[in-house]
Amino acid sequence: MEDYTVKSVDKALWILEVVSDYPEGISITELAGKLDMYKSTVHRLLSTLARRGYIEQDVHSGHYKLGYTVLDLGMRLLTSIDLRREALPFLQQLAAQTAEVVHLALLDQGEVVYVEKVDSPMTIRMHSRVGKRVPVHATGLGKAILAHLPTSETRTIIARYGLSPLTEFTLTDEGTFLRALVDVRKQGFAVDIEENELGVCCVAAPVFTNSGQVMAACSVSGPKSRMDEARLKTLAPMVRETGRQISERLGYKVTEQDGGRSNLQSER
């Protein structure tokens, strides 16, 4: 079997694993000895990891220890796992009510990542699957999340990842897109009418953490033949209610006025 291992990546991950055993830090000399690498090689790898926040160097001792980016990644994983477990009953209920496919997704690196999917026997076969990533601007899920981020953060995402057309219906003008997000925030839901995939439409609503930050979105998707304007209007309150229920389960109260939100301390 052919080995596709990238040696520099393998070495960097090895460094993280070794450094994790030293919460108070480890010197570069000791680290190089444990890894059986040249100090110059270890230094280059440490510098790269430090630049990305995976490694930190103590200003006094000069020793290296894990950076907070590692913690952030771990917390994201734990959050997504907890989110899936808490959200699943509500997603299943929504799928049963609508007889359409239901998704739950997170925002990561300018893309929407599907973390849960509940199928319905009535739905057409869709290209979505858990773990799949799609551009954030072309989905109802992505727009539902972006609408509740600070505008500066949304602009940064647009500047970095662009608004490339996936279909002829994708919003690709920044001004138009940002104005659409204002409407999404006011009404509490977003729609995607063949913007990501021809023949498929969806309605999505945000999900918030107990600290009031948007963390995900849920949606109902189906073929355009069943998702006309009247159906979208019927589904929107149901999807918004599911987002509210999941958010409340996570400890946050979503109010109806302009998609506003008020804190609800978790009792779990």
Image: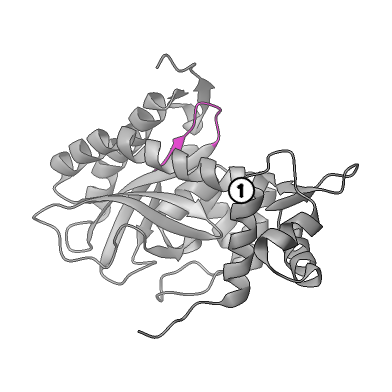
Q: Amino acid at mark 1?
A: Val
* Residue 205: quarter of image: top left
Front-most of residues 256 and 116: 116
Residue at numbered disc 1: 70
Residue found at x 41% / y 76%: 168
Seen from the viewer's position, the closer of residues 242 and 32 is 32
**Residue 59 x/y as whole percent:** 89, 44
Residue name at image x 47 percent, y 75 percent = 165
The stretch of residues the image draws in magenta is: 205-213
Residue at x 38%, y 41% (from the top left corner): 81
Quadrant, the C terminus: top left
The answer to whether 191 is drawn above or below residue 84 in the figure is below
Residue 3 location, quadrant: bottom left
Q: Horizontal and vertical percent for residue 180? A: 52, 53
Residue 46, image quadrant: bottom right
Number of marks in picture = 1
Q: Is residue 70 left or right of residue 166?
A: right
Residue 189 visible in rendering: no
Whether residue 75 can be seen here: yes
> Which residue is drawn at the image coordinates 26% and 34% (left, top)?
90
User: Residue 208 lies in magenta, yes or no?
Assistant: yes
Task: Work out whether 254 lies above or below 7.
Answer: above
In-image side of 91 versus 159 (left or right): left
